[in-house]
Amino acid sequence: MKYQNDDFLLNELKEEFKSIEAPNLSKEIKARYIMKQAKQKRKINLHYLFRPAIGLLAILVFVLLIIISEHNIKAPINIPLNEKYHQEITFKSLSAINLLPLDNSSDEVIPLSKTSEQEIDDIHKYMLFVEQSLSSSILTKTLKSDNKEYKYKDQITMTTPLGQVYEYVFYYNLSTTSIQDDEQEYKINGLMLFEGNQYILRGEHEVEGNEYKTTFIAELNKNNWVRIVLEIEDDEQSYLYEIYNNGSTSKMKFEIENDDNQAEVKLTIEENQTKNQYKFQKETHNNQTQIKVKTNEENIKVYIVFDKNNNPIYEYFIENSNQKIQKEPHKKHQGPQGPQGPQGSKDSKGPKK
Amino acid sequence: MVNNEELNKLISELSKGNLDVFEEFYEKTKNQLYYYIINIIQDKHLAEDILQDVYLKILNSLSSYKLGTNPLAWMITIAKNTSINLYNKRKREVYYDAYENPNLYGSVTNPMSEDTPLIDTMFQVLNEKERELVILHVINGLTHKEISKILKRPLGTVLWQYNQAIKKLKEKVGERDEISK
């Protein structure tokens, strides 16, 4: 009977709860937080140094494939490197630049658990790449080289589905190093001009049957370099980025699989013995396109919607919590920032000597 | 009960990078978060792990907290997302049974005994959603409006569910008292 009074019942309950003490973990939490902060600082430093180089290497893979196609290099068993096929690959390589976080954002990989909003922030960094991986257009223009050191000059323009324009100028020489029964190897060296910077690169391309492997290395100095390896086999493509900075290495891997015209992108990030993975897949339901994202913990759907001014916006829908978050696409290479072609851009005037 | 003004001051210090106040901040808030997590997870050891993760997330998200608002509501939202994510990840239903799970809050008790702690009765009589409301309102001192925001449920629903929960609890305790007479 004593509990028939609400206040008495609830006060009793409160008193009982007071006797339960949460463990004292403040020192452990503080130590973990300090360690995490230190790690993050190291990662940010690494990222700032290498972001442009990695992006460029991705582009170069694409460029190499275009070159091979243009120069009519064929596999010994007479499988032509179909241009359309190359453009598909190149597009994916080119868009890889957008996987790298923006200058004003952290490059922290997704830890095992985050709040949904934080997770969306992280996924958003990769969305442009994923969206581009599924459709885009690329225009390659071969120009007369205005640099005596390089025989060829290409201008590449890529327009994404959301209307962002990427332009690059590439000077290069190409040579065949080995031709055997069903194997061919080519070497390429050149200069890439992008957003007012110039990069020296060297690479190799191997063809064996219907398998292709391309390796590019950009060396900033002896202690700082980036390597990208592209492998293609049937409907599977994988891109491996290895970043070496003064003794520490981090790796990122993209795998793109086409199955019955359904592309799936798998991204794995390995750093400091931590491995995180995301899977992206495009789907169309009732004429609306969506991208399904699977992270370590969440199922998220991404839609492209349009605001009042008809500007595209990514809308993230978190299945677990029915939460919707809208974010504008990144526009870091849009407009006047990038080279504007042979007439309008400083990049088109030829490499600096 | 946790004082919002004090907590806001501590969060402000933490935001400035002053980790010396963390112990005090933890002491003042740990129980509220722990009760909430354990209600969802129903595993004492796992709840301790999650508690650590929740505080790490809080420290990492300090910039997203609007100073002057209710810090506990903000912290509980983080605890909720973290616990639910983990719960879904485990992909298995966990039902509380005091006889199978005697370590949750204390000893095994007979729900019909007058000596049974109210907490045990609460766990046996109320479902997770109902317990969540009782813990957030009665133990953590949040208003129904704040709870409605955190749980993304209409205020009317929260009020109705809370009243139902208290009614159920009272009825069970009443039955128990009658039997023990």
Image: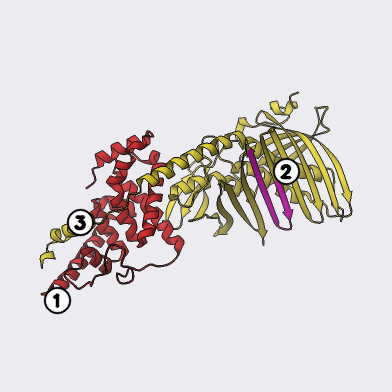
In which quarter of the view is residue A146 placed?
Answer: top right
From this viewpoint, is residue A229 visible? yes
- Which is nearer the N-term, disc 2 or disc 3? 3
- Image coordinates of residue A279 in percent, x first then y, are 57, 55
Q: Quadrant of the C terminus of chain A?
A: top right
Q: CA distance from mark 3 to mark 1?
A: 24 Å
- Image coordinates of residue A284 in percent, x first then y, are 57, 58
Q: Which chain is red?
A: B
**Chain of the residue that carries numbered disc 3 in the rendered image:** A
Q: Amino acid at mark 1?
A: Ile
Q: Which residues are magenta?
A: A229-244
* B103, above or below A80, in the image: below
**Chain of the residue that carries numbered disc 2 in the rendered image:** A
Q: Which chain is yellow?
A: A
* A74, above or below B93, in the image: above
Q: Quadrant of the N terminus of chain A?
A: bottom left
In which quarter of the view is residue B138 placed?
Answer: bottom left
Marks 2,3: beta carbons within 8 A: no
Marks 3,1: beta carbons within 8 A: no
In front: mark 2 or mark 3?
A: 3
Q: Would you name the residue on which mark 3 appears?
A: A14
Horizontally, residue A153 falls left or right of residue A295, namely right
Query: Which secondary structure, mark 2?
Result: helix
Q: Label 1 neighbourhood size at 10 Å, few (<14), some (14-19), many (20+)? A: few
Q: Would you name the residue on which mark 1 appears?
A: B179
Query: Which secondary structure, mark 3?
Result: helix
Q: Would you name the residue on which mark 2 appears?
A: A61
Q: CA distance from mark 2 to mark 3?
A: 65 Å
Q: CA distance from mark 2 to mark 1?
A: 80 Å
Q: Label 2 neighbourhood size at 10 Å, few (<14), some (14-19), many (20+)? A: many
